[in-house]
Image: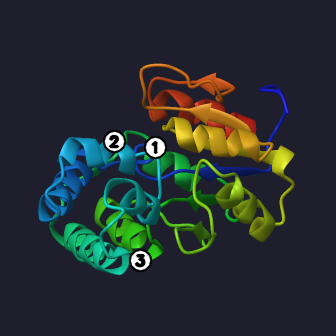
Amino acid sequence: MTGHESADFVLFDVDGTLMNAIANQRRMWATWAGRYGLDGDAVYEVALRTRPVDTFAEVAPDADPDECLALLHALEDEDVQIGTYDAFAGAAELLRALRPGSWALVTSNYEHRVRGRFARTGLPVPPLVVDATAVAEGKPSPAPYLRAASLLGARPERCLVVEDAPSGARAGRAAGMTVWTVNSPGPTPDSHRHFPTLAAAAPEILAFSGA
């Protein structure tokens, strides 16, 4: 698909794309890392590009993965209630302007936390959220985006992926979808187009989707 054609569906990453939760995520992972005597910044860099279970395997291979996950769950559930984060400018207006049933969220987080954070920031939640439990492999595997397309009844080549991270862009590209990146200094090797902010991309996303 080229940038001049229309997509039937738009698939959004969440953290870093629609919502700014970087400070919260850094703080949460620093707390988690401290419990295991690890460097918080180093752990966070791994967590940015992998699912939690894969992060544990890389940074704490000798720790009990169930214990690691239980601690992370507790910290993230607490963050949903007390964390400070904001939707990126233009996010709410963009999501409300898209045709119902034409978009979904594809996240490495968990659906109940996404819904809790969206409720606090006023973002609408679509019927479909493909989360960490929906697939066996997370980004950069194409599995999450292919799962979303399948559930929406969409051909991959008719999907536009909106991402901020290299691993997510790689996942979308590997799925055979058009990939646009936002909210980062420059494009990734796998993005077809790049916008410095989500707000800058919003009119193009709406036009591209036929909304």
At label 1, the amino acid type is Thr
Quarter occupied by residue 35: bottom left
- Residue 185 to residue 19: above or below: above
Q: CA distance from mark 2 to mark 3?
A: 24 Å
* Residue under label 3: 112
Which badge, 1 or 2, comes first in the chain's sequence? 1
At label 3, the amino acid type is His
- Residue at image x 41%, y 50%? 15
* Residue under label 2: 45
- Residue 72 to residue 46: above or below: below
Quarter occupied by residue 75: bottom left
Label 2 CA crowd tier, 10 Å (few <14, some 14–19, many 20+): few
- Residue at image x 29%, y 79%? 67
| Residue closest to the eye, 85 or 172 | 172
Q: Secondary structure at mark 2?
A: helix
At label 2, the amino acid type is Glu
Q: CA distance from mark 1 to mark 2?
A: 17 Å
- Residue 188 in percent (x, y) is at 56, 25
Q: CA distance from mark 3 to mark 1?
A: 18 Å
Which badge, 3 or 1, comes first in the chain's sequence? 1
Label 1 CA crowd tier, 10 Å (few <14, some 14–19, many 20+): many
- Residue 145 to residue 62: above or below: above
* Residue under label 1: 17
Label 3 CA crowd tier, 10 Å (few <14, some 14–19, many 20+): few
- Residue 118 in percent (x, y) is at 38, 64
Which badge, 2 or 3, comes first in the chain's sequence? 2
Proximity of marks 1 and 2: CB atoms separated by less than 8 Å: no
User: Is there any visible trace of residue 210 in the rendered image?
Assistant: no
